[in-house]
Image: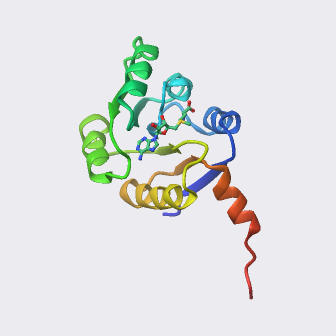
Amino acid sequence: MVVRVILTSDVKRYRKAARALIKGKDRVLEIGCASGKTTKIVAEIAEKVVAVDKSALEVSRARERLKDFTNVVIEVRDATEVNEVKKLINDHLNGRVDVVMIDLGGVADPGEVLSLTRRYSFAFKPKLCIVKNRLLIDFIKSCEIYQ
Ligand SMILES: C[S@@+](CC[C@H](N)C(=O)[O-])C[C@H]1O[C@@H](n2cnc3c(N)ncnc32)[C@H](O)[C@@H]1O
């Protein structure tokens, strides 16, 4: 199965893509949820959301923002530890992820973002990944395929 990957350059487009492409029956894994602003948008649409961030402070802010939502689980995890995130998904989403969202921040290494996109696509076979990283877009645009 081919995973559709949507690349976005900024948070406005990241959220716009989430609103447009996530459906009511979807189970979503959000990586890099920060204080949960995008999580809230996704939680209003999706069936269930598991959101992770490596910052305990951001996770506590996100939990406060989402405290009235019953379809959201927010945990401190380092997304590079894919097996740790997998355990969360098994516990809360019965192992099924339809959409993976990845936003590690404005200056995140595009190589790391690309690597995580591939690892999570392989781990969960979602139908869709929505990824935010401007440097990755700049790099791809600068490439030429030599035939
Ligand atoms: C720009 S913020 C995310 C904003 C959020 N997606 C939104 O739309 O409001 C980036 C977040 O990625 C988190 N982050 C960076 N590397 C991470 C990693 N390896 N695992 C989990 N979270 C990570 C940071 O702690 C930070 O909160």
- Residue 39 lies, in percent from the top left, at 50, 28
Could you tell me which residue is drawn at 64 percent across and 58 percent down? 136
Residue 110 image position (x, y, % from top left): 57, 57
Q: Position of residue 33 (x, y in %)?
A: 47, 33
Which one is in front, 111 or 74? 111
**Is residue 53 shown above or below 78?**
above
**141 to 26, vertically: above or below:** below
Q: Where's residue 113, x and y in %? A: 52, 55
Task: Give residue 62's quadrant in the image.
Answer: top left
Above or below, 66 against 93 in this view is above
Is residue 27 found left or right of 128 in the rendered image?
left
Q: Is residue 76 left or right of residue 15?
A: left
The residue at 53%/63% (across/down) is: 2
Residue under the point 66% across and 55% down: 135
Q: Quadrant of residue 67?
A: top left
Near-viewer residue (58 or 124): 58
Q: Nearer the viewer, residue 34 or 49?
A: 34
Residue at far top of view: 68
Residue 66 relative to residue 22: left or right: left
